[in-house]
Amino acid sequence: MRLGSFPTMAELRVFPLACVVQNYAWGKLARDSEVARLLASSEPILRIELDKPYAELWMGTHPKGDSLILDNRISQKTLGQWIAENPGCLGSKVKEIFHGQLPFLFKVLSVNTALSIQAHPNKELAAKLHTQYPEHYPDTNHKPEMTIALTAFDGLCGFRPVEEIVAFLQRVPEFRALIGNVAAEQLERSVGDDPRGVSAALRICFTRMMKSEKKICAEQLNLLVKRITQKGCFPDFF
């Protein structure tokens, strides 16, 4: 390397990063969070707040969390800036397909409670939703995900068996009030039907629940809590 010049990509292939963390409510508190431990190990002078959840650590070029470069020999301040000036690091195929952009966001998650429901559209729909609702879809990327469990981890995929959902509709009046009798009865009739009939009935119920007004959801939730409290015990059907 020439004296007084910045190192080239070929000369400097690895450099440390300071990664952004997200303090979502579902994350583990600092003392139990692997995210907090990783953050502390990479930035020793950073103060970790013990009563705060540390849910996600992001390593990438996301607009809301572009990783900072911790190497004074590099002129660029962030990973996104470095890749923009050294797009060859992506490889010719990735560079061409993704227009010189890093096509993934690497995350480490420390999960304490259930994550919020998310919608992961395909690439075409993501671009359309970004144009229509940029506050909810801040970029045009689709969101395929791959998860690797570093510790014991329980994951849920899909819906409960339809028989269980029907049992809840019959035993939890507040739940049935959100869905509505018409949709609930259609799902009840679908039990034992062909998979397409069950899927159609389930879609209607799920749509009704997700599109319920916040005021109605709050009212029914309060009624449920009141009923459980008056019974003095938690129902065994949950």
Image (spheres, rainbow, N blue to C red):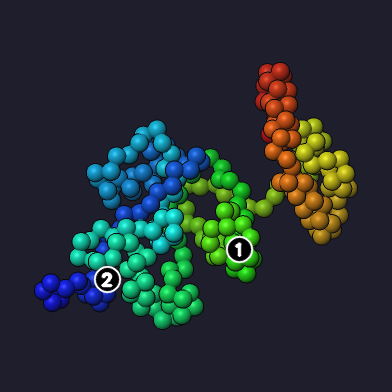
User: Splitting the image into 4 quarters, where does residue 91 fall?
Assistant: bottom left
Determine the residue positioned at 86% across, 51% down.
190
Say what secondary structure mark 2 lies in. loop
Which x, y percent locates residue 189? 88, 48
Residue 162 in view, yes or no:
no
* Crowd rating for badge 1 (residues with CA inside 10 Å; few <14, some 14–19, many 20+): some
Query: Which of the labelled discs sits on residue 198, or is there none?
Result: none
The residue wearing badge 1 is 131
Which x, y percent locates residue 48? 32, 39
What's under tag 1, amino acid-wise?
Thr
* Crowd rating for badge 2 (residues with CA inside 10 Å; few <14, some 14–19, many 20+): few
Q: Nearer the viewer, residue 52 or 155?
A: 52
For residue 52, above or below residue 87: above
What's under tag 2, amino acid-wise?
Arg
Say what secondary structure mark 1 lies in. helix
The residue wearing badge 2 is 13
Determine the residue positioned at 37% across, 71% down.
84
**Is 105 on the left or on the right of 213, as rendered?**
left
**Is 40 on the left or on the right of 231, as rendered?**
left
Quadrant the C terminus occupies: top right
**Is 229 on the left or on the right of 43, as rendered?**
right
Which x, y percent locates residue 173? 80, 32
